[in-house]
Amino acid sequence: MGAFQKSIAITGGAGFIGSHVTRLFVKNYPSCRIVNVDALTYAGNLENLRDIDQLPNYIFEHADICDEQTIEQLFGKYNFDAVIHLAAESHVDRSIMDPLAFVKTNVLGTGVLLNTCRKHWSDNRDNKLFYHVSTDEVYGTLGETGFFTEETPYDPRSPYSASKAASDHLVMAYYHTYSLPVIISNCSNNYGSHHFPEKLIPLMINNIKHRKPLPVYGKGENVRDWLWVEDHARAIDTIFHSGTIGETYNIGGFNEWKNIDLVKLLCSLMDKKLGRAAGESEKLITYVKDRAGHDLRYAIDATKLNKALGWKPSLQFEEGLEKTVDWYLNNEEWINHVTTGQYQQYYADQYSRR
Ligand code: NAD
Ligand code: TYD
């Protein structure tokens, strides 16, 4: 397409992980045109890409992936060689409040993208790729031991994870039925800059800063496997360029934390940063009503990705968490913009009844 060697659509590029993936691709591949296709829902924020949005190989297209006609037009306009699909409704608590929004974007939206790729790539599938970014939550929940591997049967339990599982199945159906070149990766919980403060880590950072109660669900015993978002973006880059068509790759941090331990670690880190007495922020911890169907534990075995493609996480968690806290403390304007208006309403709806 034009002077560019390749044309790549990144859906959901204005979101948390999408903005890190977009930044990496725009910077590392100046010969590729990177088109960020995003509907700018509450979670999409073009401020996330301010540092790269003037670069000549970056374009933003405001579009809803469920809108077949618009997606068709974009394929006609840019003749995409590849799609990296991140656009989704992504928050479990919202999926409990409004499951159909998740069915729409995550299932129908993925179907529209797959079908458009199928039509446009029917004559020549060489060097084409539909890369689907998914989650470890499709595997359900673990007990106190064991890990999710690529062979673990799907067993989603929340409307969010069920909608992501459905989208993964659709992707594989297009591979088997139409030979569409696809790859899927399933990643564990991400953390880092530009993370919307409805998710555990940025919500706690924001609440600690403002001395607001820290709402820990249930007993805080649930375990998540945390990965620095820039390591996830690097894994996507590696798999995009070197992964095998038709395969799935698990991506994880080898880094399990009980929620309560993680919240306490954040409290002590922020006490130091904010010049508070040791133990001061921990007093804000408030145990609240548990999430319905709350998965106990997620833990990824990322051996396949490590052995096949050499990827491994680059950052220790404590270091990544400190970088993350610093980013939030240094980017007050960003956090102020995303926590006004709609966020206040969401927070009241979500937490006042707990
Ligand atoms: P996010 O909620 O921060 O961002 C989602 C983005 O998608 C936003 O920019 C939003 O505007 C856009 N979007 C939503 N609906 C759309 C639609 N109908 N059309 C076009 N754009 C739309 O999400 P995230 O945390 O960055 O997650 C990105 C992807 O990675 C998702 O597919 C998610 O399932 C997956 N994932 C997330 C995590 C995690 O820890 N956050 C872990 C593993 C996998
Ligand atoms: P979250 O960031 O929503 O990610 P996910 O549910 O997709 O893993 O939540 C991470 C963990 O933190 C999860 O076990 C739920 C818990 N949690 C709380 O205890 N309090 C909160 O306010 C939130 C948002 C999450």
Image (tube, rainbow, N blue to C red):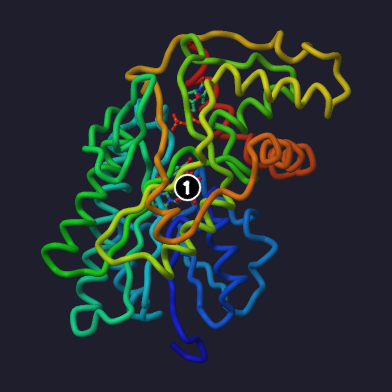
Whether label 1 lies within 8 Å of ligand 1 gets the answer yes
- Residue 341 spot, x, y in % from top left: 60, 34
Up-down relation of residue 39 to residue 345 (above or below): below
- Residue 27 spot, x, y in % from top left: 62, 71
Few, some or many residues within 10 Å of mark 1 (<14, 14–19, 20+) = some
Q: Secondary structure at mark 1?
A: loop
Residue at x 61%, y 28% (from the top left corner): 203
Please tell me how many numbered marks the rendered image carries: 1
Which amino acid, mark 1? Thr
Residue 323 or 149: which is nearer the viewer?
149
Up-down relation of residue 206 to residue 138 (above or below): above
In the visual, does 314 lie left or right of 288?
right
Residue at x 50%, y 86% (from the top left corner): 4
Residue 180 or 63: which is nearer the viewer?
180
In the visual, does 78 lie left or right of 210?
left
Residue at x 19%, y 63% (from the top left corner): 175
Residue 186 or 289: which is nearer the viewer?
186
Res 240 → quadrant: bottom left
Q: Quadrant of the N terminus?
A: bottom left
Up-down relation of residue 316 to residue 117 (above or below): above
In the visual, does 236 lie left or right of 243?
right
Res 305 → quadrant: bottom left
For the question of whether residue 336 can be seen, the reply is: no
Residue 94 or 141: which is nearer the viewer?
141
Disc 1 designates what residue? Answer: 41
- Residue 53 spot, x, y in % from top left: 64, 68
In the visual, does 13 lie left or right of 162?
right
